[in-house]
Amino acid sequence: MANQLLAGKRGIITGALDENSIAWKVAQKCKEQGATFTLTNAPVAMRMGAINKLAEECGTKIFPADATVVEDLEKLYKDSVDYLGGKIDFVLHSIGMSPNVRKGKPYTDLNYDWYNKTLDISAGSFHKLIQSAHKLDLVNEGGSFVGLTYIASQRIFPDYGDMADAKSMLESIARGWGYHYGKSHKVRVNTISQSPTKTTAGSGVGGFDAFYTYADQMSPLGNASADACADYCVFMFSDLSRMITMQNLYHDGGFSNMGIAPQIVEKFIAE
Ligand code: NAI
């Protein structure tokens, strides 16, 4: 594995809640590759305390911010730039939550106040995170934003509920801002479409274990782990990916291009 791919780069990493979080692994890999960065999460998540352990391990500071509140995000950028000693080169958006999914409301019976929350927390926050940086001009030329998404944005996975709509919006925002920020500052914006992964957000989706196993068997390489996702994020933050922007990038062991897998068909033959 190449070393020091992120030497001299400064970043902001959202969404590390506990050791299972994809963002947690991303932080560890960014540190390994020579980056300096700050960590952030919603004030309510901070109370759980685990993120302090990560900050200590990475030798950095946490700046709490609710990603739906623009003032919080502007403060996050200013504090991060002050603390890191210069403008930002990469930002990870690793934020998702649906009150409807969490409270078992199916797509056919949504609570619309919660629906607005789902869209704001899981997708609108990506727009706000990018727009705040753009307005303050606190990201360097060639900088890279990555948001994490799931294939339910483009194919139907009924139990994913209103999060599917949020992920479609997230991917669209990557294209929108990818164009505008690319033209104005050569900053890149992409989404990574990750395999099902055993985390707090992932396991909140009904039938998660079944669709984790199904995806694993459908994918020629098996499910991509959080660790492998973190490697992909490092690549996307590095200069090696400098001409990649406005893309939704599948990181799923091949799942997205499969039709059917003999392993799964055999189960029906056996019945
Ligand atoms: P996670 O539960 O560890 O991370 C979600 C994070 O969002 C938490 O740290 C939570 O505190 C944060 N968050 C929620 N509301 C917030 C707010 N208002 N402001 C700031 N932060 C807030 O779970 P995971 O799986 O690591 O999720 C990270 C991202 O990866 C999410 O966007 C998720 O949808 C995406 N993803 C996850 C997959 C999975 O199967 N676990 C598959 C594909 C994508």
Image (cartoon, rainbow, N blue to C red):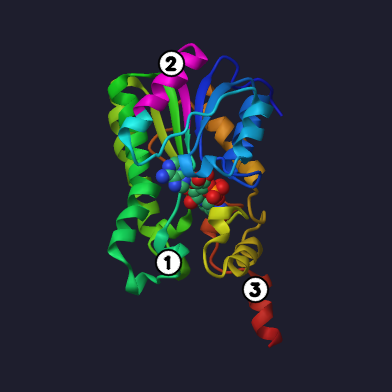
Quadrant position of residue 51: top right
Q: Position of residue 145 (x, y in %)?
A: 43, 32
For residue 143, above or below residue 179: above
- Type of residue at label 1? Ile
Q: Which residues are magenta?
A: 74-91
Q: Residue at x 68, y 79 (%)?
A: 267
Q: CA distance from mark 2 to mark 3?
A: 49 Å
Q: Residue at x 47, y 63 (%)?
A: 102
Q: Give the main secondary structure, helix, strand or loop, of the magenta stretch.
A: helix
Q: In this rendered view, identify the residue nearer to me: 15 or 248.
A: 15
* Residue 264 tag number: 3
- Type of residue at label 2? Lys
Task: Give the SS element for disc 3.
Answer: helix
Q: Which residue is mark 1?
A: 156
Q: Which residue is mark 2?
A: 87
Quadrant position of residue 264: bottom right
| 151 relative position to 173: left or right | right
